Amino acid sequence: MPRPAWQKSSFSTGGEGNCLELAAAATGPHIHLRESDDPHHIATLPPHTLAALLHAVKSHPPLPSSK
């Protein structure tokens, strides 16, 4: 099975941490997501579910920082 070609999200900060990566699944119309700090935990979603997730994230204000 081919390895996914991971691409950083355009919303990633570019520094260490805060980096979401995406890759097309080898089969079907699914998309893989992973956090760069924990690359072995991968979520695989169909495009409509990813669109709903992004819509929900964009429509809610950020949570207060714990710092």
Image (cartoon, rainbow, N blue to C red):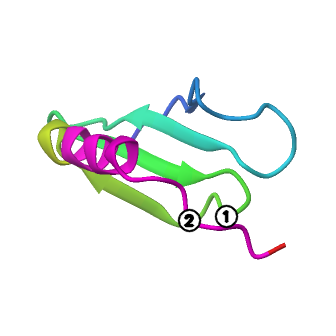
The quadrant of the rendering that contains the C terminus is bottom right
Q: Nearer the viewer, mark 1 or mark 2?
A: 2
Residue labelled with disc 1:
38
Q: Residue at x 59, y 44 (%)?
A: 20
Q: Which residue type does callout 2 highlight?
A: Leu
Residue labelled with disc 2:
63
For residue 50, which quarter of the picture?
Answer: top left
User: Which one is earlier in the sequence, the residue at label 1 or at label 2?
Assistant: 1
For residue 38, which quarter of the picture?
Answer: bottom right
Residue 57: horizontal and vertical position, in percent?
38, 49
Depicted 21 relative to depicted 14: above or below: below
Between residues 38 and 12, which one lies in front from this camera angle?
12
Callout 1: SS:
loop
Q: Residue at x 17, y 44 (%)?
A: 46
For this view, does 51 lie left or right of residue 20? left
Identity of the residue furthest to the bottom in this view: 66
Mark 1 surroundings: few (<14), some (14-19) or many (≥20) residues within 10 A: few
Residue 25: horizontal and vertical position, in percent?
31, 38
For residue 43, which quarter of the picture?
Answer: bottom left
For this view, does 41 lie left or right of residue 17? left
Q: Which residues are magenta?
A: 50-66
Queried whether the magenta region covers residue 58, the answer comes back as yes
